[in-house]
Image (cartoon, helix red, strand yellow):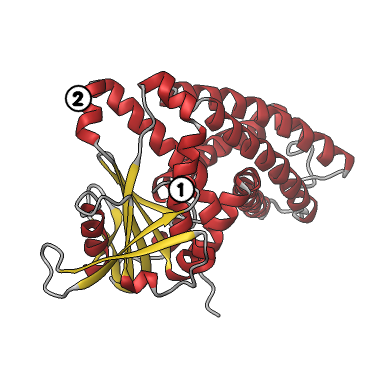
Amino acid sequence: MKLDYTNRARGIAYKYPLLSSIGMQINFWIVAYIIFFLLLYFISKAVTSLYPQKVEVYLGENIIVALIAAIIFGTILGIVDFFVEKRLRGKSLGVEMLTKGFLYLAAWYVVGFISYMVGTAMQARFVDSPILKYSELFSGNIFYATSIYTIVMIIIISFITQMNHKFGPGVLIPMLLGKFRTPSVEERVFLFMDLKDSTTYAERLGHIKYSEMIQDCFLDVNKIIASFNAEIYQYVGDEVVLSWSITEGLRKMNCIKFFFAFQDFLQNKKEHYEKKFGFVPQFKAGANMGNITVAEVGDFKREIAYHGDTINTAARIQGVCNTYEKFFIISESLKDQFEWDDSFSIEFLDLITLKGKKKEIKLYGVSTKDLSL
């Protein structure tokens, strides 16, 4: 079975967000600090080779100290990232950066002190010289070099973290390896979910309050996607497009159950929405599956884009929900993938030619007995 790195990484990030944050930081700092101590080793080798007498340069104990420092520092920063982003959600990026910067600095001093204690206890040395020793971690050249290097590495890991948020878990590494530079074909499931009666809501609330409602709705979408391993492909106005690999979309009927789970979630927050906006928003959705082309597009602004008839058809299926007075419509190709149980009601709607298409497709309305959808 072919290992799908993106799905595996996304599943872990969704299921264990704190451990994922800590793990990413630890892995990064292990590599960063091993590289740093290797640089010190080879620089010390180069410098001491200029002296007439033989000077021993040490590496083994320093690598152990580097690993311990990386694990402690990575754990602290992973916890900081997770809780700061959670607590400061909705605050400005500047406030988040200042808070993280202060906590990162405190963490660095803690790790520096621990490294000094561990290095001293192990009697670790850089070279046979009193000049380069672990007491220098808090004063002198080693302290300055380590601090500058750590600051640069913090900037790099912060950039990686932001890219992970932009593209989603498990996408950055394949992107760096050039996976999406050349268009390739994948089989995926797409679900287009749009706010029902959006014009009425916008007129009733006004632009600012309406946008606040959309923000709340999309935050709630993000709160439940972990349970269904969904990928948010894009937000378009008051519409959100979700996607699954064919394996994840069909597994446990994720692409079907997600929609009803989201509707349930909104109903459970009924008091919040009614108090803040005066009503509980409802969404309508259309879903389809099939082959699409995936590629990296753009130059000044790049993104991973999906192209093809499959995604266009999903969008147009969602567009006819109002016509058939249904909240959720799927294509026949998707309907035939499942063994439907009694908790779902499947209704054949029509054999139609969607706008822009020549081939007729069968549409089915999906509802549950728990919700009048």
Q: Is residue 48 visible?
A: yes
Position of 23 with respect to 4 (left or right) is right
Cα separation between marks 2 and 1: 36 Å
Q: Secondary structure at mark 2?
A: helix
* Identity of the residue drawn at 49% across and 72% down: 339
**Image point (55%, 52%), residue name:** 227
Residue 312 location (% of width, % of height): 21, 62
At label 2, which amino acid type do we have? Answer: Glu
Q: Measuring from the top left, give residue 245's x and y in whole percent.
A: 43, 66
Q: Is 170 positioned to the left or the right of 37 in the image?
A: left
Dot 2 or dot 1: first in sequence order is 1
The answer to whether residue 41 is above or below residue 184 is above
Is the residue marked by circle 1 packed among few (<14), some (14-19), or many (20+) residues within 10 Å? some
Tag 1 residue? 164
Tell me the quadrant of the picture where the N terminus can be found: bottom right
Q: In the rendering, at what x and y percent does residue 103 appear?
A: 61, 25
Q: Residue drawn 69% across and 45% down?
A: 70
The front one of 92 and 318 is 318
Q: Residues within 10 Å of mark 2 (few under 14, many from 20)?
A: few
Compared to residue 100, the image places residue 145 above or below, namely: below
Q: Which residue is mark 2?
A: 203
Front residue of this view, candidates 60 and 8: 8
In the image, which is nearer the foreground, mark 2 or mark 1? 2
How far across and how far down the image is residue 19, in percent? 66, 47
Does any portion of residue 159 appear in the rendered image?
no
Tell me which amino acid carries mark 1.
Answer: Asn
